[in-house]
Amino acid sequence: MAFVARRLFPVCTDYTMTSLSNPTAGGTSAPGSSQSDVHAKVYGDAEHLQIPAAAAHVSTEKMLDWFKQMLLIREFELRCMQSYQEKKIGGFCHVYIGQEAVAVGCTAAVEHKDPIVTAYRDHGHALARGMDPRACMAEMFGRIGGCAKGKGGSMHMFDRDNNLYGGHGIVGAQTPLGAGLAFGCKYIDEVIEGKANSRVSLCFLGDGALNQGAFHEAMNLAGLFDIPVIYVVENNGYSMGTAIARGTTMAHSLITKAAGYGIDGYVVDGMDVVGVYADMKSIADKCRATSRPAFVDMRTYRYKGHSMSDPRKYRTKEEEEVFEKHDPIGRLEARLKAAGKLTDESLKAMQKDVRDTVRDAVTWSDESPIPPMAELYHDVFVEPWGPYTGSSQPQMNGGTANQPSMRTIDTKEELS
Amino acid sequence: MSAVREIEYRDALREAMSEEMRRDKRVFLLGEEVAEYNGAYKISRGMLEEFGARRVIDTPISESGFAGLAIGAAMMGLKPVVEFMSWSFSLVAADPILNNAPKMLYMSGGQFGCPVVFRGNDGAGGQLGSTHSWCVEGLFSNVPGIKIAIPSNPYDAKGLLKTAIRGSDPVFFLESERMLGNKGEVPEEEYLIPFGQAKVIRSGTDCTLASWGRPVHFCMEAAEEMQKLGISCEVIDLRTVRPLDIGTVVRSVKKTGACVVVDQSWSFGSPGSEVASQVHRHCFDDLDNYVHRVHSADVPTPYATNLEQEYLPNARKIAEAVRSATYNL
Ligand SMILES: Cc1ncc(C[n+]2csc(CCOP(=O)(O)OP(=O)(O)O)c2C)c(N)n1
Ligand SMILES: [Mg+2]
């Protein structure tokens, strides 16, 4: 079987990117700085992509829109952390701060009809996809107004209207699902509707998920069946406290894994939203046209701990600072300002807007009622059976036998 | 006699592992974040330092791979202890842990055993949602060839884990994140607790409460409440569900004539239904009422606090079941 594993764009050796010093430049970067040492420690000494020339053609409106989306996600996540401290959010909560450019750039690069599926670090994808911040926050507050009526929680964001097929809590769980979403799209178009496939699916995963068997089976299937799914590895250098090279072979060149499955692999700078957009647009267009899968090593960084309870002792403050200097929001801000498209005033107005939106989401979620007890038994089946006939305890949905106390305790009354 | 100390459940687990690793070089620990991070829940804190990276091994997030690897190593004569960060994550390793470990001895006609201990957090944590709140004893107790321990306190945790590691068969060791910080008396001197020995932890005359793991504490709470109503409960901590010490439960029910089984796993085909069935058989003429059961609701685990609380077994529900079983409603 023929396969190509290659990079779509020219490669430079300095991940820190020319765009930082020269926001509009697209040329070859200067040789590595001291920062690349830290970077190499995190990611291995891979060669890195830089923004392709196409990026220069993105309209100012688009950039401003992405800028605002990233601001929104960051503000939202900060409020999540605060709400977690205040115990309004429970369970496991993983914030997306630092990785905003990935969700925003990737969603911008595909169409709204293209399905998206991701892991548990999913608030950013939900917001970028258009989920109402109220529904997202209320979900974490465990309220009926949440996107899943408060039944899913932070790790399980679903939004049918926005073609978001979930946050998934089990590492790697979403990777075969991603293949299935794309398979489904293609099947519907080609087999049922008799037209060419029109959709690509985006399946996000963490670098840690590369080591789940499910991912490898999914990649093989995608390669084998010509499934138009793009695996976007949000390579933030760590899975919990494990630096990528401690847990993953070929950490410096993850695309070699794709090569093994006959799938094109790309390395993309995930700290630059314009670059993410431009690269992902080319990749998505190609996948759509050829109906083939792709694999993207998306280089990014999470600024905060893995979840709310991680003191980040496995890495240095210095390393964090390096990445924070290359902040996706800061970089775009500099770029827009340099181009005269953003002023201090317009930035302030935008920040205020975003703060208001998030504050409103919190207030609204605070006021959203807790789910009624009947919700405990709803949504187990589309077609529940009943009423209760008495031989065993389980019985879902509908009918009079749905009193919560009767579901859990095998009492005499339950039989009457 | 040395002084009795109080230590946390997590410390008891660590002591058991460390002591066994000191006495037997074949024992080693592997799992996600167990070494450099000192364990996601700090159970293995300091073990890397003491035993080194060859014996305390950080793995990638590859449960199927490292569970299977441990089984291979066990067939080779080693004694691996595998930490699942949560038993919820063991499901991606279902084939090795259910299809290999429990059957190896049998299908090799006694040639290859699997002395491997799989351990980790089991049951609902606190709003962890549908995928992360598994009570795997509901599933796994159905499988012959596995021993399953579900200790409710530090003393049992240590004694049972040492037995598990020292034994020659596969053991699933089910801990609870909610109990890791619980303190209890654990003597300095060495002790082992055999599997299949239930413990009567409160004696009573009117109703037998049988449970294991975290819900044992809810049973004790309920028993306290019932005492106020003049209903005397006997509480039995089964400690292991495979093997199951049904004798201790039966002896108690013959005395009390009433029984409530409390099991956090789902009710359908569960260890709870097994206990109830066996009690019905052995105490048919002694029971004044059918055996009542308290389980988690028969739905996936919800995230919202109010729903999760209603979903889980608790003292109120147990009390209600006791009152029903003893005709005190
Ligand atoms: C099968 C499975 N094993 C372990 C876990 C616990 N766990 C949750 S997130 C995580 C780290 C994942 O890291 P990565 O894939 O890089 O994603 P990131 O957190 O960096 O976004 C682990 C070990 C899990 N959820 N599922
Ligand atoms: Mg990661």
Image (tube, rainbow, N blue to C red):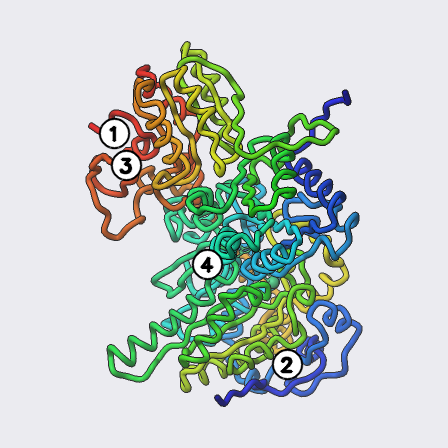
Q: Nearer the viewer, mark 1 or mark 4?
A: 1
Q: Nearer the viewer, mark 2 or mark 4?
A: 4
Report whether B235 appears left or right of A310.
Answer: left
Q: Nearer the viewer, mark 1 or mark 2?
A: 1
Residue A221: x, y in percent? 44, 75
User: Is label 4 in a helix, a strand or a loop?
Assistant: loop
Q: Tag 3 or tag 4, which sits nearer the N-term?
A: 4
Q: Which residue is mark 4?
A: A167
Which subunit holds the residue at mark 4? A
Q: Are marks 1 and 3 on the same chain?
A: yes
User: Is label 3 in a helix, a strand or a loop?
Assistant: loop
For the C terminus of chain A, give its image quadrant.
top left
Report whether A320 appears left or right of A121.
Answer: right
Q: Nearer the viewer, residue B127 or A95?
A: B127
Q: Tag 2 or tag 1, which sits nearer the N-term?
A: 2
Q: Which mark is residue A414?
A: 1
* Amino acid beneath label 2: Leu
Residue B30: x, y in percent? 65, 54
* Amino acid beneath label 4: Gly
Q: Are marks 1 and 4 in contact (CB under 8 Å)?
A: no
**Dot 4 crowding, Cα within 10 Å, few <14, some 14–19, many 20+:** many
Between the C-alphas of marks 1 and 2, the distance is 65 Å
The answer to whether residue A376 shows anywhere in this view is: yes
Which subunit holds the residue at mark 3? A
Q: Are marks 2 and 3 in contact (CB under 8 Å)?
A: no
Residue found at the far top of this picture: B230
Between the C-alphas of marks 2 and 4, the distance is 28 Å
